[in-house]
Image (cartoon, rainbow, N blue to C red):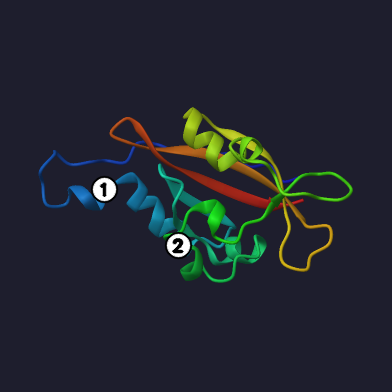
Amino acid sequence: MAHVELSLSEVFAPAAGTPTEQAFDNVGQWSGMVRRAAEPCLLIDAGTTVVAISASGCELLSLGTPEAVIGRPLLEGGLRLVDFTAVPSELTEQDTDRIPPLLALHSGRLARGLLRMQGAGTDGGTTVDAISTPVLADGKVAGSLTFFSKV
């Protein structure tokens, strides 16, 4: 299994009210990086809306193109999460609240876990390792950043 380490530092932010203040917004900064990333990754905001996803993330998660996913709620963008039983069934709302991107968002802490997704016509589904970290803005959780690795 691949070893992944995340280390996020505070982004320099100018004094409030300056014209470039929005250019230093953490979610905005990460959004550009995620869109250009070669690795499968995803950025959601505090409302669980997909802010950015890499092309390889869309491919791994069978979500089509980034343009089709960005701006939609994470769990309404075609992502079908299933359990790990022999005959996979869709996760309950209680279970989906514990997936790493949402857990990092709600807990404000790093989260890691396995996810099993099932696309249209897929029998067994795809299993991925997900590691998520909260993204802060003004000291509050403003979103979460997740990296994926196929298992």
Earlier in the chain: of badge 1 and badge 2, it is 1
Q: Amino acid at mark 2?
A: Ile
Q: Residue at x 35, y 52 (%)?
A: 29
Depth check, mark 1 against mark 2: the one in front is: 2
Numbered circle sitting on residue 52: none
Q: Which mark is residue 70?
A: 2
Above or below, comparing residue 141 to residue 56 in the picture: above
Q: Which residue is mark 1?
A: 24
Q: Is residue 86 left or right of residue 130?
A: right
Give how far across and how far down residue 95 sits, in percent: 66, 37
Q: Is residue 55 left or right of residue 84?
A: left
Residue at the image point whose x is 40% and y is 42% from the top = 46
Element marked by disc 2: loop
In the rendered picture of this protein, how many numbered marks are placed on residues? 2
Where 45 sits versus 56, above or below?
above
Residue 81 in sight in this render: yes
Query: Of 105 and 86, which appears nearest the observer?
Result: 86
Residue at the image point whose x is 22% and y is 50% from the top: 22
Which residue occupies the foreground of this view, 95 or 52? 95
